[in-house]
Image (cartoon, rainbow, N blue to C red):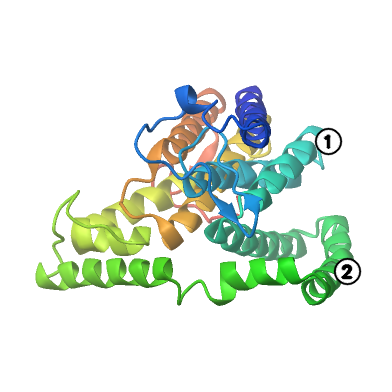
């Protein structure tokens, strides 16, 4: 399974490089046969003179949506694989692709997911008295990184204009106002249908949760949330809980959570799309295999009710 994710990450990197190079060479339509949409696409957008990266996708948001799943996977695998060089290299690649996407939602998700991940595992390391080297290094380098960013923000006008346009004035922009109207309409549909929802395909929002409420209603949203919780917290317990398959499954679950986090910010429909469900299905399949072949004690709505540990 890890080889498959490596291949997916490398293919994603190659298509991203081809996207940038072909644009600079005056061949912006070179990847059209590989893209999944042939309507008016946002594949040649620029932000303050910088070409927005889309790779093999039709727009930056879908590009970053796929990339954040890979980022979550490699971040978790790097933490759990004794700082594997392969996982570290793939994590660096996906981080660069996320930053180069110039997607506001990608930046917000990347920062939030990383912060939550570090806090969660820092607490687990304290409880289980694990080595704290990674957290010490992170704590030492974070102030330096923030200092460099603040200095660059003050000294580079173009960078300051880009950051202001992507974050400070984003909510007041036409796009921000439009997305707010979508959410308000979805919540109005939820209210008008007395919490039952207006049905799939009838509501567009700018948040997965709001879209689910407007489309599926309270009951449907509750079932969907239960399903996601069941998938992302499933983990066998006992002596086989640290096997390679379990670590891979945990990394896939982290990828699912990263995708879900970005969906909470931008997803217009309840469908979390193929990357999420592929990761979720393979993760559960791996855990089922471990349970069947090694008779591991398990927890979660799928595997039992034992205490949840960090994934």
Q: Is residue 226 above or below residue 115?
A: above
Work out whether mark 1 precedes mark 2 in sequence or the reverse, and give the earlier one. 1
Which residue lies at the image location 17% right of the left edge and 54% below the top edge? 202
Mark 1 near mark 2, Cβ–Cβ under 8 Å?
Answer: no
Residue lying furthest front in this view?
Answer: 26
Q: Is residue 219 visible?
A: no
Q: Quadrant of residue 277?
A: top left
Is 56 on the left-hand or right-hand side of 98? left
Work out whether residue 304 or residue 118 is closer to the camera in this orientation and state it.
118
Q: Can you identify the residue that label 1 sits on?
A: 85
x then y, percent, for residue 124: 70, 60
Q: Looking at the picture, how far across and down is residue 283, in whole percent?
A: 51, 35
Q: Position of residue 268 (x, y in %)?
A: 33, 55
Q: Report the front residue among 306 and 164.
A: 164
Closer to us: mark 1 or mark 2?
A: 2
Residue found farthest to the left = 193
Q: Give the spatial CA distance, label 1 vs label 2.
A: 24 Å
Instruction: Give the label on residue 144, or none.
Output: 2
Q: Nearer the viewer, residue 78 or 268?
A: 268
Residue sitting at 42 percent across and 41 percent down?
A: 41
Label 2 residue SS: helix
Say whether residue 199 is left or right of residue 95.
Answer: left
Q: Picture coordinates of residue 214 (x, y %)?
A: 22, 62
Is residue 191 depicted above or below 129 in this figure?
below
Q: Is 191 situated above or below 223?
A: below
């Amino acid at each position: 399974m890890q080889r498959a994710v490596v291949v997916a990450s490398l293919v994603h990197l190659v298509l991203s490089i081809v996207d940038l190079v072909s644009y600079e060479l005056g061949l912006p339509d070179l990847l059209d046969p590989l893209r999944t949409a042939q309507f008016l696409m946002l594949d040649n957008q620029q932000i303050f003179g910088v070409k927005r990266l889309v790779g093999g996708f039709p727009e930056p948001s879908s590009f970053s949506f796929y990339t954040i799943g890979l980022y979550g996977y490699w971040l978790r695998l790097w933490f759990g694989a004794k700082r594997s060089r392969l996982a570290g290299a793939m994590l660096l690649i996906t981080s660069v692709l996320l930053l180069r996407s110039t997607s506001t939602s990608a930046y917000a998700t990347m920062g939030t997911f990383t912060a939550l991940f570090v806090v969660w595992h820092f607490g687990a390391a304290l409880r289980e008295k694990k080595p704290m080297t990674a957290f010490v290094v992170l704590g030492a380098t974070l102030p330096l990184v923030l200092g460099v960013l603040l200095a660059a923000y003050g000294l580079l006008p173009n960078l300051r204009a880009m950051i202001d346009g992507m974050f400070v004035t984003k909510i007041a922009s036409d796009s921000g106002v439009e997305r707010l109207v979508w959410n308000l309409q979805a919540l109005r549909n939820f209210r008008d249908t007395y919490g039952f929802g207006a049905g799939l395909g009838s509501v567009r929002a700018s948040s997965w949760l709001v879209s689910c409420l407007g489309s599926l209603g309270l009951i449907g949203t509750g079932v969907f949330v239960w399903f996601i919780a069941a998938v992302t917290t499933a983990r066998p317990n006992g002596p086989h809980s640290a096997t390679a398959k379990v670590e891979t499954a945990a990394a896939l679950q982290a990828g699912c959570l990263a995708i879900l986090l970005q969906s909470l910010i931008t997803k217009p429909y309840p469908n979390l799309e193929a990357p999420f469900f592929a990761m979720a299905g393979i993760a559960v399949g791996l855990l089922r295999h471990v349970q069947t072949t090694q008779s591991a004690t398990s927890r979660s709505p799928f595997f039992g009710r034992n205490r949840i540990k960090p994934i």
